Amino acid sequence: MESTHTREAWNKGKLIGQKPALKPKDIWAIRIQLQNANHVRD
């Protein structure tokens, strides 16, 4: 017995492909958050 129900793709409507690179401002924000959390190695 075949079902005719088709499932929608999980990534339908989402942007795919390479994401833009992080800006220096974003990198500094991440570093500050990690330092405040005492997770310097991450």
Image: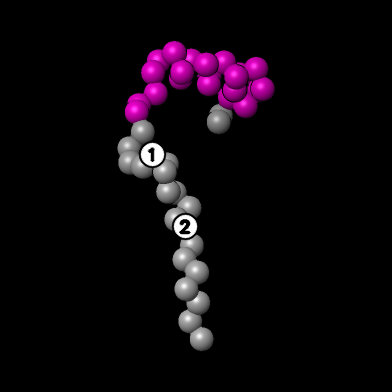
Q: Position of residue 12 (x, y in %)?
A: 42, 48
Residue under numbered circle 1 = 15
Q: Residue at x 50, y 77 (%)?
A: 3
Asked if residue 32 lies left or right of residue 38, the reply is left
Cα distance in 3D space between marks 1 and 2: 16 Å
Residue under numbered circle 2 = 8
For badge 2, the amino acid type reads Glu
Quarter of the figure with the C terminus: top right
For the magenta stretch, what is the residue range? 20-40
Q: Residue furthest right?
A: 37
Q: How many marks can you see? A: 2
Task: Please state which of residues 39 and 27 is positioned toward the viewer in this rendering.
Answer: 27
Q: Residue at x 51, y 86 (%)?
A: 1
Q: Is residue 38 magenta?
A: yes
Disc 2 crowd, CA 10 A, few/some/many (<14, 14-19, 20+): few
Image position of 26 with respect to 1: above or below: above
* Quadrant of the rendered image containing residue 38: top right
